[in-house]
Amino acid sequence: MQKIGCLLIAACIVLFPSPLFAQSPTWKVKPSICISRNVGDRCRMDIHIEFGHLAPGDYCLYQGKQKLQCLTENTRQLGTTVTFSHNIDLTLIDSSGIPILTHPLTIKVRHIANTRRRIKQPWSVF
């Protein structure tokens, strides 16, 4: 009798998987680094987002506290343009206002040296 009970429980687990075993939502955000010339410059970049294991529902994409756009039911890829002047977070929020995924967007500053290299020494003893 115990064998039948164990087999029945095993069959239920296999046939009706629990939400505890469901995969968590994922996303890939590319690129996530913007390079600017000077500190404080505004950075504008086109980003591409791929969603994986996202449960059906209504979601919106936020840049900090600003809403960028909302997703449709079957959205698996998304492209958008973001503009920012300091490091921010890109957040996917569901219809109840709970953050589902967060990804940082960072700015790196490229320092350009304005020094001129001398080709020939100005004088020599010999």
Image (tube, rainbow, N blue to C red):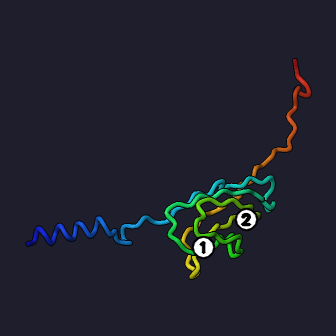
Residue at image position (19%, 70%) is: 8
Percent across and percent down for residue 3 are 11, 67
Tell me the kind of residue under disc 1. Answer: Tyr
Q: Please tell me how many numbered marks the rendered image carries.
A: 2
Q: Nearer the viewer, residue 56 or 23?
A: 56
Q: Nearer the viewer, residue 80 or 64?
A: 80
Residue placed furthest toward the left:
1
Q: Nearer the viewer, residue 53 or 16?
A: 16
Percent across and percent down for residue 40 are 79, 62
- Residue 84 located left or right of residue 61: right
Q: Quadrant of residue 19?
A: bottom left
Residue placed furthest toward the right:
122
Q: Nearer the viewer, residue 69 or 115?
A: 69
Residue placed furthest toward the top:
126
Residue at image position (77%, 59%) is: 43
Mark 1 or 2: in front is: 1
- Residue 89 located left or right of residue 41: left
Residue 86: which numbered mark, if any? 2
State yes or no: discs 1 and 2 in contact (Cβ < 8 Å).
no
Q: CA distance from mark 1 to mark 2?
A: 25 Å
Q: Quadrant of residue 116?
A: top right
The tag earlier along the polypeptide, 1 or 2, is 1
Quarter of the image containing the N terminus? bottom left
Label 1: few (<14), some (14–19) or many (≥20) C-alpha neighbours in 10 Å: many
User: Which residue is label 1 attached to?
Assistant: 59
Does 47 sit above or below residue 92?
above
Percent across and percent down for residue 113 are 81, 44
- Residue 121 located left or right of residue 103: right
Does 7 sit above or below residue 32?
below
Tell me the kind of residue under disc 2. Answer: His
